[in-house]
Image (cartoon, helix red, strand yellow):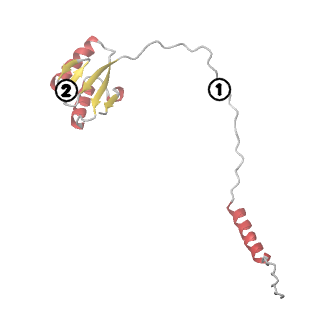
Amino acid sequence: MHIATRRRRTPIIPIIPLMDILVILLIFFMLTTTFPEKRESLAIDLPKVTNLPASTKIDQRITLEIAQNNEMRLADAPVNLRGLAGALKKMKAALPDAKIELKADDDVSLQLLLQVWEILTEQGFPIKDVPVRVQVN
């Protein structure tokens, strides 16, 4: 018994459409590619520090704390909002170079913070010189 087998055809790959696609891709990449421009640079020799005096002065700040229940403490002494201006005035007279740091709880109202900042500004402590730390519970 003789079984006839079909002869397999060799696959034909159409080259012409593939070349068209490759030419279109080549044109696309040539048109969209940007080449870096040469930039002129200037060589700068920066000075080197050989002897730098060490600064031993540590900036000590007096803490003004505002707790969650709006209790205030200036340098660990309790003070209320009405007496804050007087306490700051006394402290400024005793320590003219003193700096303040405001340490507030995150639940303190914005209105109270603004009142404290206003009092600090009136007593000669500008807001830009008073760092604020907010304690998150």
Q: Which is more foreground, mark 1 or mark 2? A: 2
Mark 1, other Cα within 10 Å: few <14 / some 14–19 / many ≥20:
few
Which residue is denoted by mark 1 in the rendering?
A: 46
Q: CA distance from mark 1 to mark 2?
A: 52 Å
Figure check: 136 above or below 55: below
Q: Quadrant of the C terminus?
A: top left
As drawn, the residue found furthest toward the front would be 1
State the residue at coordinates (69%, 59%).
Answer: 33
Q: Nearer the viewer, residue 8 or 20?
A: 8
Residue 55 is left or right of residue 77, and the answer is: right
As drawn, the residue found furthest toward the left would be 82
State the residue at coordinates (26%, 11%).
Answer: 94
Q: Secondary structure at mark 2?
A: loop
Task: Tell me where residue 11 sits by quadrant.
Answer: bottom right
Q: Nearer the viewer, residue 69 or 3?
A: 3
Which residue is denoted by mark 2 in the rendering?
A: 71
Q: Position of residue 1 (x, y in %)?
A: 83, 88
State the residue at coordinates (84%, 88%).
Answer: 2
Q: Nearer the viewer, residue 107 or 57?
A: 107
As drawn, the residue found furthest toward the right would be 2
CB within 8 Å, label 1 to label 2: no
Residue type marked 1: Leu
State the residue at coordinates (29%, 21%).
Answer: 63
Q: Position of residue 40 (x, y in %)?
A: 71, 42
Residue type marked 2: Glu
Task: Tell me where residue 125 sits by quadrant.
Answer: top left
Q: Position of residue 20 (x, y in %)?
A: 75, 74
Say which label, 1 or 2, has the lower sequence index: 1
Q: Position of residue 117 (x, y in %)?
A: 26, 30
Residue 82 is left or right of residue 60, and the answer is: left
Question: How many marks can you see?
Answer: 2
